[in-house]
Image (cartoon, rainbow, N blue to C red):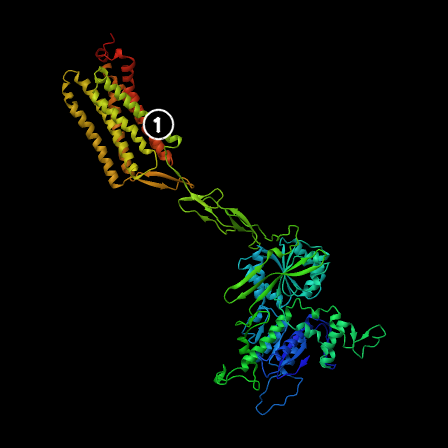
Amino acid sequence: MQKAGDVVLGGLFEIHFFTVFPDLSFTSEPQQPTCHGLDTPGFRNAMTMAFAVDEINRNSNLLPNVTLGYSLYDNCVQLAIGFRAAMSLVSGQEEQFVLDETCAGTPPVIGVVGDSSSTRSIAISTVLGLYRVPMVSYFATCSCLSDRQKFPSFFRTIPSDAFQVSTMIQILKHFGWTWAGLLISDDDYGLHAARSFQSDFVQSGEGCLAYTEILSWANDQAELRRIVDVMKKSTARVVIVFAHENHVVNLMEEVVRQNVTGLQWIASEAWIAATIFQTSRLIPHLAGTLGIAIRRGEIPGLRDFLLQIRPDLHGNENSLVKLFWEYTFQCRFAPPPAGWVEAGGTICTGQEDLQDVDSKVIDMSNLRPEYNVYKAVYALAYALDDMLQCEPGRGPFSGNSCGSLKGLEPWQLVYYLQKVNFTTPFGDQVSFDENGDALPIYDIMNWLWLPDGRAKLQNVGDVKKSAFKGEELTIDEDKIYWNFESKKPPRSVCSESCPPGTRMARKKGQPVCCFDCIPCSEGKISNKTDSIECTSCPKDFWSSPQRDHCVPKKTEFLSYHEPLGICLTATSLLGTCICAVVLGIFIYHRTTPIVRANNSELSFQLLLSLKLCFLCSLLFIGRPRLWTCQLRHAVFGISFVLCVSCILVKTMVVLAVFKASKPGGGASLKWFGTMQQRGTVIVLTSIQAGICTVWIVSASPVPHKNYQYYNDKIVYECVVGSTVGFAVLLGYIGSLAVLSCLIAFIARNLPDSFNEAKFITFSMLIFCAVWVAFVPAYISSPGKYADAVEVFAILASSYGLLVALFGPKCYIILLRPERNTKKAIMGRGVE
């Protein structure tokens, strides 16, 4: 189909879809292939180009004084035929050329609109690119065509599959579908889409493909049954079909045969709008399908142009119009085939009215590929217009030259086509990026199942990309029809999301989307869904029972608020009170013989030191602080040395008095006067004070957070600072206690008047036994129990001394006052 003009645009369209190839043997004459079966949408695409050229020629603002023509070819949906057509367009082999002596002139066509197939566009633009002949496709979407090195003069007004795949991935993410099956056609369209899905969807971690199956061109029923079986057995509820309409038809027949339901279909732009699927037989299986469709546009005046089509107006050369006419009205132009009239066939008059038949050609409600054809023609026109408006001497080419119609080179038009920028009457901006791709925009479509059993294709959103905002996906979920009982989007995941507190553990041999949820171990948490690993809590924190957040670790120390601390505190205060009571009894009865016997002053000092021993245990209870850590062992050591020193001096006085009672023994008493006794106690206690001072100054005990005893607790304790200092302190107390015990043991058999040595011996044995048992118990007790053991040892030894030394005397003072006489003390009996 041709129209003459100053410059001519070429066009490649699918007018027929069945081809009979001739015998190509060398023995026969070359023959042309025969095409059959009119493709109505392809014819409308071709007529849209004719309308756009006609509209441009009537526009005085665009290409004034230049008439556009066109030369349209049918590719019969075959690569070989489409390639031959393209070569015919650019070579002009059907025309006679008379070149002037400059060999200058306008080429046969300045650009080609087409092809509709990615495979054919790849083959054709590979050759056209060598000569920089611009080719603007309205339907070829393969992302491979964006390679400017291989296809330097290829442009398109339809988004590439890279954007289509990106849009599908956005839809999957929008509904939380991470587990999907992929069906592709066995051509560049499908194979490149599969690679894009593998890189953009799988390797990026957005989701996983449960299976990838290739739909062959041959209608292999066994292979189709196998593919449908895979779909049925898979747990993926979402199926993406990136294939052509004829592939999907065969597949859907097998889906109906096996009654496969419960799947959410995602359709590519190649078949989402195909009416062949919207039948009562297929719609129960395909209702609710979501898909991506070419942007729908409006072309004012196109319907009127199509209604004006008449075979007699286009002349004999426009055979396509006659073929369309015969197909639409089921008639034949004269001369008809033999037997046509006899069989009841009608003769075409050429005056039939298109409005009288239900023709899809004049349906303007869903202009999608046509809108891209319209934009492609205008893009070439605007590029040519920009070139012709170039001012001489200010052009973009060598020597600041401009292009002209007389010496037009195709590469010059490629330069201006790259910079074209205009807005369609429908309001869409048209421009091309550095790869020749137009600003991408798609409509999101959904198949609505109507109550009468019919299907309706409805727009539920769109996705577009702008230079400023990037990709924008808009979906109106309230309008979407879901073909499920719940009327909600299905769940399509290999494994359910791992909640906080768990981590994902991949299943061996399966995709990354298939995993088990493993609870975080103690001390680790995950605070978000689908965590790959659990993170450790900070040192002072521990994991919550749910393992979803960190909580402060429990602190442990011997507290006043817990039962053990309360008992020890009460016992300590009780001991202190008993000491105070005993001291009061002794002070009240200080003139009685039993109090005055064996140095009452030492008894008072001993009671005061015992009171300090009881009170020092309180320093071991409560949260350790620096001053309590420093004081607890110092006060404990000094208090017990003071106590044991008093006992030691008491014991030595007993022996001295016994020796003084013997002839010639009075001299020994001069060493144990009151001043000497006080001085001995002070000196012995000062030594311990010196030990404590050196210890605190050199290696002071400090509070410490111990993380070793328990994982989920912090044990507050006082580290001794210097083990040697602690050992010397205990050793000094022990040595004095052993010495007191030995001296008391020696004096145990003295006359009854000095039988206090027996009580001293008994008290020292208790004291030594307690502290000998304390050392291993202290070492083996963790945390607060070490402090509890030490407090228990202090209280046990203090009570032992208090009861053994003062219990018998209080008994006599309070209950047996008749024995509290000088005669009884001297051993003369009770009067």
Foreground of the two, 322 or 782: 322
Camera-side residue: 236 or 791? 236
Task: Tell me the residue at 58%/92% (across/down).
Answer: 101
Please count the marks in the image: 1
Q: Is residue 423 visible?
A: yes
Up/down of 530 relative to 592, above or below: below
Q: Residue furthest bottom?
A: 101
Q: Is residue 642 above or below residue 179?
A: above
Quarter of the figure with residue 194: bottom right
Please name the residue that numbered disc 1 is placed on: 570
Residue positioned most to the right: 342
Q: Nearer the viewer, residue 749 or 645?
A: 645
Quadrant in which the C terminus appears: top left
Residue that extends furthest to the top in the rendered view of this protein: 831
Tell me: 316 left or right of 408: right
Image location (x, y in percent) of residue 192: 59, 66
Instruction: Give how far across and how far down residue 756 sits, in percent.
Output: 25, 18
Q: Return the residue nearer the eye: 11 or 592.
A: 11
Q: Is residue 255 above or below residue 669?
A: below
Tell me where residue 674 sits by quadrant: top left
169 displayed left or right of 679: right
At which x and y percent is residue 647?
Answer: 24, 24
Look at the image and tell me whether residue 76 can be seen.
no
- Amino acid at dot 1: Ala
Answer few, some or many: residues within 10 Å of disc 1's Cα (few below 14, many 20 plus, some between 14 and 19): some
Q: Is residue 213 left or right of residue 499?
A: right
For the N terminus, which image quadrant?
Answer: bottom right
Q: Is disc 1 placed on a helix, strand or loop?
A: helix
* Residue in the picture at 64% in, 77% down: 11
In the rendering, at what x and y percent does residue 701 appear?
29, 39
